[in-house]
Image (cartoon, helix red, strand yellow):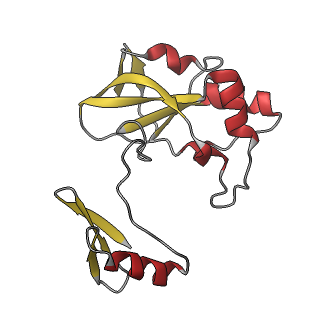
Amino acid sequence: MRSRYEGNTPTIAMPDGTEFRGDNNVVNEALTKFLGCEVTLVREESISHFDEGPISIITTSALRKLSQELGEPVDPRRFRANFLFDTELTGYRAEDWVDRLIKVGSKVILKVVAPLQRCVMVNNSQEELKQDVRILKNLVNNHGAAFGVWVKVIVDGEVSDGDSVYLD
């Protein structure tokens, strides 16, 4: 399926190309039939399940610390980050970067806005990763539920795997 917004109204495109507007209850019947379970499309008022910001960053140092705390390696895919920065730091140091600028490659500049609060999604199985409820529990108990940071783009451009990263 695909979706897009027309103003404030979502439009859902089914695999066969049929489109349903979110403000028409027929969309509920179509989604229920397609997914095989009762579905009701509603506007989410208080909490968005879209990540907190446009770009998220985690670091290898934070992954090493979390892996140490859990007693086994933690796969970075659990965090659905846009960037995984390879650092020689120790621990969860990215949270100290709030309000600082990061240059990636020759042109891109990002501004660190805030620590990234995590939800139950980090526990969920995905690809070949099994469900692991310890992850969020550890983050809540030891790190205020934060892991990584979210940033906004100050100067856009292309980045490539292996680009240098500089913290300003």
Left or right: 19, with 168 as reference point = left
- Residue 158 drawn above or below residue 32: above
Q: Position of residue 29 (x, y in %)?
A: 40, 81
Along the viewing direction, whichever of 27 and 136 lies nearer the viewer:
27
Viewer can see residue 106? no
Extreme residue in the left direction: 7
Left or right: 66, with 117 as reference point = right
Extreme residue in the front direction: 25
Residue 17 quadrant: bottom left
Residue in view at x 37 percent, y 23 percent: 113
Q: Quadrant of the C terminus?
A: top left
Residue in view at x 40 percent, y 45 percent: 48
Extreme residue in the right direction: 71
Residue in view at x 38 percent, y 37 percent: 55
- Residue 147 drawn above or below residue 133: above
- Residue 16 drawn above or below residue 31: below
Q: Position of residue 21 (x, y in %)?
A: 25, 72
Q: Position of residue 67 (x, y in %)?
A: 74, 33
Count of picture labels:
0
